[in-house]
Image: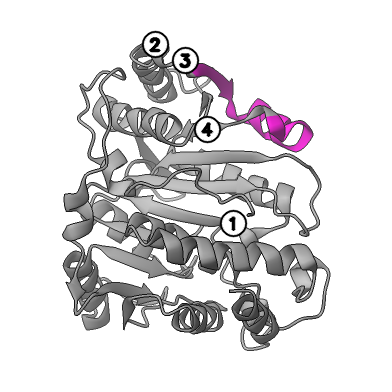
Amino acid sequence: MLKAFVRTTTPFIDLAKQNFARAASTTVTPNASSILKTTKYGGKYTVTLIPGDGIGQETAAAVKTIFKAANVPVEWEQLDVTGYTQEGDLLFKQSVDSLIRNKVALKGILYTPISRLGHQSFNVAMRKDLDIYASLVIIKNLKGCPSRHKNVDFAIIRENTEGEYSGLEHQSYPGVVESVKIVTRAKTERIARFAFDYALKFGRKKVTCVHKANIMKLGDGLFLNTCREVAKDYQSSGIQFDDMIVDNCSMQLVSKPQQFDVMVMPNLYGNIVSNVGAALVGGPGIIPGANIGREYVIFEPGCRHVGKDIQGHNAANPTALILSGVLMLQHLGLNDYANRISNAVYKTIESGSAKTHDMGGQSTTTDFTLAVISNL
């Protein structure tokens, strides 16, 4: 059996719900109530589905087809939000209401316009309004997928709700713009504990804090010092802790990525590091991820690439969204379905029977989907 992305199964919300002051020696046990709160009718879970922009409709169709073939007990509540959907639009409100109702969503990548002033990113709005504070991206080699490095397997955890993505910008004088970076002790402690709890739950050995405290001595200094304080609570668990300046981290990632296990960092650094990590193991098409809060979880590809250049060409690699869906099934406790689908994906990639263009082949999205189904 091929190795799964997550080494054991537990609802991700359980990690997000840990009390700030809880010592690491306290046993963390799966909380069934977090699963039971998910909307379920007639033996099926209802999940919000937002395909996203670019290749989103094609990759979402692949997931729906595979889930149907595997008889996964999931009903989709699909909402075709785009990156251009305004916060005041009815569709925006309906998507938020759907997530609040269902607690769990599977989402593709949404395009965020660069030139539209005052336009709030749907992603940022959802994370801040619903306090979906922890971003998880898993960077791991897949057998059969060409990559620059071997034996890479680490998790990137970033704080979602503050940092440079606080959205506090203003023009103080014509030609002078101030962007405010927010760092708080409470939210830093929360994300640090999430990272250590994740390491404990999934058998990881080390947590690395990534920062720029040598220059941003107050903001990143607070982030680093808070992570150091949290690390003391976990010393008895045997989890190692170290820290690394973000520019050195970038160099270390491309030279020796095997040294990393769990990485925790502020928002902007995590966005950049996730993309670097994707390039190490085969590109954004194979990177799964999740955004996790105390009440809601959104599963989505770990790299924010909409693939607009290949939209409509039936050329996208749906692996990232499929494996994000696998993480969702594990969260829901549907472990047998998760294992069947993930093993089918790994077998398809390892065999080379349906390589999409990003993996060095000419197979279509449809070819890959059918190959996965044949391997179920």
Instruction: Identify residue for label 1.
Output: 287
Where 237 sits versus 188, above or below?
Answer: above
Residue 44 position within the rendered picture, expressed as x and y whole percent measured from the top left: 26, 76
Task: Tell me the number on the disc at residue 262.
Answer: 4
Element type at marker 3?
loop
Dot 1 and dot 4 residues touching (CB under 8 Å): no
Dot 3 and dot 2 residues touching (CB under 8 Å): yes
Q: Give the residue drawn at x 67%, y 79%.
A: 371
Residue 90 shown in magenta: no
Rounded to the nearest whole Å, what is the CA distance between mark 1 and mark 3? 28 Å
Rounded to the nearest whole Å, what is the CA distance between mark 1 and mark 4? 16 Å
Q: Is residue 356 left or right of residue 182?
A: right
Span colored in magenta: 240-258
Q: Amino acid at mark 4?
A: Val
Q: Give the residue drawn at x 32%, y 60%.
A: 332
Q: Amino acid at mark 2?
A: Ser
Task: Tell me the number on the disc at residue 238.
Answer: 3
